[in-house]
């Protein structure tokens, strides 16, 4: 299963509040084909829970993961970082054999 850091959890909650979707939507994390290393991460706010989704509970919201994403992200940590070059979510994925320099794609 994946883990959210406290900073990521708070940022997701803030995004949901800003969009007026807290309690109505969750964060969907998905791994799809593409990117320079073969697989890439996608994240977006989603109001629809699929029947096969696995849920990870956050503070007042859920993270939705399809079964294949669960397999690819087993043991991963989702964090939020702010720096000189901007801010954003980062996934530390122990299953990634290689990832590109931008951190947006990986291969298993």
Image: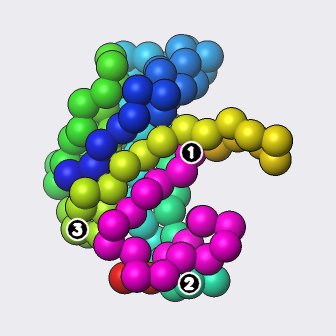
Give the magenta part as a residue range: 89-106
Q: Kindly identify which numbered label has been placed on residue 37.
A: 2
Q: How does the figure colour the protein chain or chains?
A: rainbow
Q: Residue at x 68, y 36 (%)?
A: 82
Q: Residue at x 48, y 42 (%)?
A: 79
**58 relative to 105, above or below:** above
Q: Residue at x 40, y 82 (%)?
A: 97
Look at mark 1 in the image and give the residue it sits on.
Answer: 89
**102 relative to 62, above or below:** below
Quadrant containing the C terminus is: bottom left
Q: Is residue 105 magenta?
A: yes
| C-alpha separation, residue under disc 2 versus residue under disc 1 | 18 Å
Q: Is residue 58 left or right of residue 83?
A: left
Q: Kindly identify which numbered label has been placed on residue 71.
A: 3
| C-alpha separation, residue under disc 3 versus residue under disc 1 | 20 Å
Q: Residues within 10 Å of mark 3 (few under 14, many from 20)?
A: few
**Element at label 1:** strand
Mark 3 or 1: the one toward you: 1
**Element at label 2:** loop
Q: Is residue 47 visible?
A: no
Indicate which disc, 2 or 1, sits on the residue closer to the N terminus: 2
Q: Is residue 2 visible?
A: yes
Indicate which disc, 3 or 1, sits on the residue closer to the N terminus: 3
Q: Residues within 10 Å of mark 2 (few under 14, many from 20)?
A: some
**Element at label 3:** helix
Indicate which disc, 2 or 3, sits on the residue closer to the N terminus: 2
Q: Residue at x 22, y 68 (%)?
A: 71
Q: Quadrant of residue 57?
A: top left
Q: Is residue 107 left or right of residue 53?
A: right
**10 relative to 47, above or below:** above
Front residue (pair 52, 57): 57
């Amino acid at each position: 299963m994946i883990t959210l850091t406290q900073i990521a959890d708070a940022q997701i909650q803030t995004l949901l509040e800003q969009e007026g979707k807290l309690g109505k939507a969750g964060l969907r994390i998905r791994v799809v084909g593409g990117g320079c290393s073969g697989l890439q991460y996608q994240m977006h706010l989603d109001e629809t829970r699929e029947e096969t989704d696995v849920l990870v509970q956050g503070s007042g919201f859920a993270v939705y993961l399809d079964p294949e994403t669960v397999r690819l992200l087993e043991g991963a940590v989702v964090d939020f970082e702010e720096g000189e070059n901007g801010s954003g979510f980062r996934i530390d994925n122990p299953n990634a054999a290689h990832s590109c320099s931008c951190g947006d794609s990986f291969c298993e």
